[in-house]
Amino acid sequence: MKASFKAKYDADKATAASAVTLAFNAGDVKLRASMTDATVVNGPSLNGLALAVEKPGSFVIDYNVPKKDFKFIFMNTIRISDKPLNMVYSHSRGDQRTMLDGTLVIDSANKVSANHVLGSGNCKLRYTYVHGGVTTFEPSYDLAKDSWDFAVSRKVYADHVLKAVYQTSNQNLQLDWFARSKMIGSYKSE
């Protein structure tokens, strides 16, 4: 049996927050318990406590203890003409929301994905094309809004990415700079 322990402290927020995750591998499944500082700050409580059972690539069952809320995620991959179609079904009891996601990987540079929230009429389609391993083009169409979004991202340095997103529904252009550094960690600038 293997166990892992992960802790996080975020001092950047207006109120500092911390989280701890303890995970055990038990054969094919992973058992996980997570808690935030809300669980212990004002004495022991169930606030911020979450439990999970996961079989990687098959399912995840999350239980939020204070909210008494279950979330089920089932995933599978099927082949269509030797191309993998990754499918994910998720349902959150508390949100009363069920989602279906699918991604067809055509080759290493091309994939098509769809996201649908059942009962909402909300369906998004996205095509992703990676050119030369450094530039990614992502047009997407939102059926509920009847609008297109266009995103282009490019690796600038080995671990820096510049991304531009244009949303036609509100004529919004957004520029982001992502960086992942071994010395200072990850950051994002908008």
Image (cartoon, helix red, strand yellow):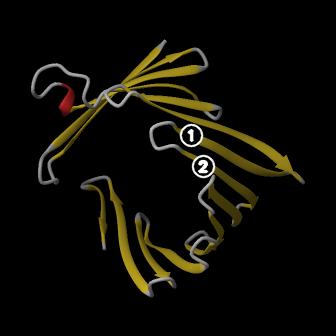
Q: Nearer the viewer, residue 54 or 7?
A: 54
Rendered residue at 59%/80% (across/down): 148
Disc ID at residue 91? 1
- Quadrant of the rendering where the C terminus is positioned: bottom left
Sequence-wise, which precedes: disc 1 or disc 2?
A: 1
Q: Which residue is mark 2?
A: 99
User: Image check: 134 left or right of 127?
Assistant: left
Separation (CA) of disc 1 from disc 2:
6 Å
Q: Residues within 10 Å of mark 2 (few under 14, many from 20)?
A: some
Q: Quadrant of residue 24?
A: top left
Label 2 amino acid? Answer: Met
Disc 2 secondary structure class = strand
Label 1 amino acid? Answer: His
Q: Residues within 10 Å of mark 1 (few under 14, many from 20)?
A: some
Q: Position of residue 168 (x, y in %)?
A: 51, 85
Rendered residue at 16%/54% (across/down): 12
Q: Position of residue 120 (x, y in %)?
A: 59, 58
User: Image check: 123 left or right of 63?
Assistant: right
User: Image check: 160 left or right of 18?
Assistant: right
Q: Are marks 1 and 2 in contact (CB under 8 Å)?
A: yes
User: Image check: 102 left or right of 49?
Assistant: right
